Image: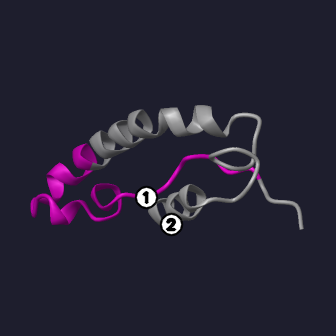
Amino acid sequence: MVPQRRTARGRIPSINRPERYNADPETHAGIKQQARTQLESALAHLEQALQGGVYLVGNRFTIADAYLGVFLG
């Protein structure tokens, strides 16, 4: 089996459940947008690390890949 190349895109609670951060539905769109912006910024270095490769560290599966998979869901 050949591993598939991943990208660093995932989910965080403020994107999926903005009501956890503010009960007012009128604020949810702004909360989601801010969360997307922060997520893209935080994961930019992971995208760079995955360029041209399958694994996050080196040429084999490591705990870093497993943790990234849990984090990105």
Q: Magenta span has 20?
A: yes
Is residue 4 shown above or below 33?
below
Amino acid type, callout 1: Arg
Residue named by callout 1: 11
Amino acid type, callout 2: Gly
The quadrant the N terminus occupies is bottom right
Disc 1 to disc 2: CB gap under 8 Å: yes
Q: Is residue 53 left or right of residue 28?
A: right
The location of residue 31, given as percent across then percent down, is 23, 48
> In percent of the image, x 40 and y 33: which residue is there?
41
| Badge 2 element | loop
> In percent of the image, x 49 and y 67: which residue is there?
70
Residue range highlighted in magenta? 5-31
* Quarter of the image where one finds residue 58: top right
The location of residue 14, given as percent across then percent down, is 27, 56
> In percent of the image, x 75 and y 50: which residue is there?
5
What separation in Å lies between label 1 and label 2 (alpha carbons)? Answer: 7 Å
Of residues 68 and 32, the one drawn nearer to the viewer in this rendering: 68
Is residue 43 shown above or below 62?
above
Q: Which labelled disc corresponds to residue 73?
A: 2
